[in-house]
Amino acid sequence: MVSILDKKSLEPLLNWHELIEWLIEGHRKPLPQINDHLMAFQEKRLFNRVAWIEGLGSAVKTCTIFPNNSKQGIEPVNGMMTLFAEKTGVPEAIIDFLLVTKWKTAADSLLAASLLASPNPQKYLIIGAGTVARSLIEAFTSYYPDLEVFIWNRTESRALDLIREYQNHCNITHFVDLAQAVAMADIVSCATMSREPILKGEWISPETHIDLIGAFSPEMRETDDQTLKIGKIFVDYRLTTLDHIGELIIPIVNGTIQREDIIADFYEMESGRFARPTDDCITVFKNGGGGHLDLMTGRYIYHKWQQSKKTELAIA
């Protein structure tokens, strides 16, 4: 029987530190088989991700992306993920899409920051005030409890709403001047739907870690060429980023950077290559969020659900 795992009942069981360890362990397994299929009509998207990893089974995640939904008070991204058993291929669970995506996306960036950012970051800027910004606040302040969070968003009212929502959770401040916020930050996360660069390299201070999340299609970028020129570039997985996302496709085609400028991805953690090269460098990470990460995250969520059921039976 397929289990339906919803966000409301499962989220209290999850832990950011645990998930990072699951992602590290998942990258010790054989390379995944993955396939992405993106369909577009005007600004709308239908996105399908498939992943298979020996030792973890397989998963299919499907979502729609309708940016204008926000104007109607509806989530712009909706979908579901089906998890299949390793040995039999039997569907084991249908997991809330928003739950998987929230935890996968933020943990992807958090894992990178834990390896690439300066050891004791104090100031964290999030560019954007949407759903991803919320998960980033929760993830990063869990891992770095003393972190001061800055928020910048094109629509100021949304930034202020977000700050009110989290003002009792952490030290969180709104910035009007984006250049000033970037210059002050130890870590900068871009989580926007921007198609044109919004983050400029001239604003970035030495030792800063840049985390690029929002761009997911060939025409989208969140930062400019200068950021990539001055930064040491890392990705979560070469196969899901270099030829699929404008953040890297466009500057590679234009000759701004070369493919060889990408230092490492998560599959090179064991070798030690996925690490901060020098104390004073700027690091740039592209969070591409492939289906293999959805599968690893889905396995973690399913594992926590199974543990909770065993606990309930033991108590009964």
Image (spheres, grey):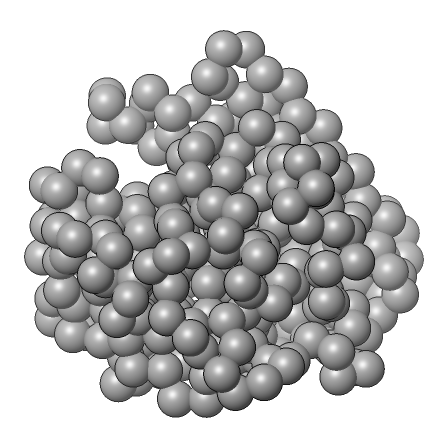
Question: Residue 22's image quarter?
Answer: bottom right
Write down the quadrant of residue 28 in the picture: bottom right
- Please state if 7 lies on the left or on the right of 57 as rendered: left
Give me the residue at 63% from left, 62% from top. Answer: 233
Q: Nearer the viewer, residue 309 or 159?
A: 159
Query: Residue 201: x percent and y percent?
Result: 42, 55
Residue in the picture at 53% in, 47% down: 225
275 lies above or below 134 = below
Q: Is residue 300 visible?
A: no
Q: Is residue 5 above or below residue 271?
A: above
At 34% from the left and 32% from the top, the residue drawn is 75
**Residue 205, placed above or below residue 296:** below
Left or right of residue 7, residue 2 in this image: right
> Which residue does the image show at 87% across and 60% down from the upper left?
31
Which residue is nearer to you in this view: 273 or 306? 273
Report the side of 274 relative to 134 (left or right).
right
Residue 261 is situated, as x and y percent measured from the top left of the image, at 72, 60
107 vs 119, nearest the viewer: 119
* Left or right of 168 on screen, residue 25: right
Could you tell me how many numbered marks the image carries? 0
Task: Look at the image and tell me whether residue 182 can be seen.
Answer: yes
Percent of width and height locating residue 10: 44, 61
Note whether 275 is above or below 43 in the view shown. below
Q: x, y percentage for residue 47?
A: 62, 29
